[in-house]
Image (tube, rainbow, N blue to C red):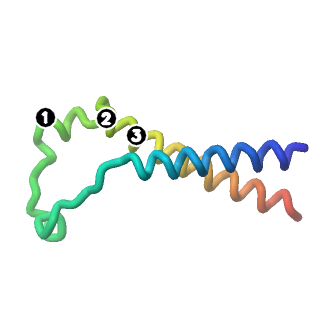
Amino acid sequence: MVRTVLTVIFFIVCVALCILILAQKGRDSGIGGLTGSSSSSDTYWAKNKGRSREGMMILWTRILAIAAVILVAVLNISRF
């Protein structure tokens, strides 16, 4: 019973994670991103990114990814 509930929760987390990843914008910074020459850390956008929609999407992506890893571990441990 518990395994079935965890499997359903895992499925929902994985679908939500896929949707969040696909909804986010790409991070193409070109050659400047490779060399580290982009100094956008002092901009208004960089300082307030956590309060924006994109910042919330990044936060929820991290939370769901951690939840997925934990659920995979729990589901695999419960097999034995």
Instruction: Identify residue for label 3.
Output: 57
Q: How many marks?
A: 3
For disc 2, the neighbor class at 10 Å (few under 14, some 14 to 19, many from 20) is some
- Which residue occupies 30% across, 50% down? 25
- Which residue occupies 15% across, 46% down? 41
Amino acid type for the residue under numbered disc 2? Gly
Q: Is residue 66 above or below residue 53?
A: below
Of all residues, the one furthest to the top in this rendering is 51
- Which residue occupies 77% across, 46% down? 6
Quarter of the figure with residue 77: bottom right
Q: How far separated are the C-alphas under marks 3 and 2?
A: 9 Å
Amino acid type for the residue under numbered disc 3? Met
Quadrant of the drawing holding the N terminus: top right
Answer with mark 2 or mark 1, whichever residue precedes in sequence. Answer: 1
Q: Is residue 46 above or below residue 72?
A: above
Instruction: Identify residue for label 1.
Output: 44
- Counting from the top left corner in percent of width and height, residue 20 is at 46, 46
Q: Does 80 sit left or right of 36 as displayed?
A: right
Instruction: Identify residue for label 2.
Output: 50
- Counting from the top left corner in percent of width and height, residue 52 is at 29, 32
Secondary structure under badge 3?
helix
- Counting from the top left corner in percent of width and height, residue 13 is at 61, 46
Disc 2 vs disc 1: Cβ atoms closer than 8 Å? Answer: no
Amino acid type for the residue under numbered disc 1? Tyr
Answer with mark 3 or mark 2, whichever residue precedes in sequence. Answer: 2
- Which residue occupies 42% across, 40% down? 59
Q: How far separated are the C-alphas under marks 2 and 1?
A: 11 Å
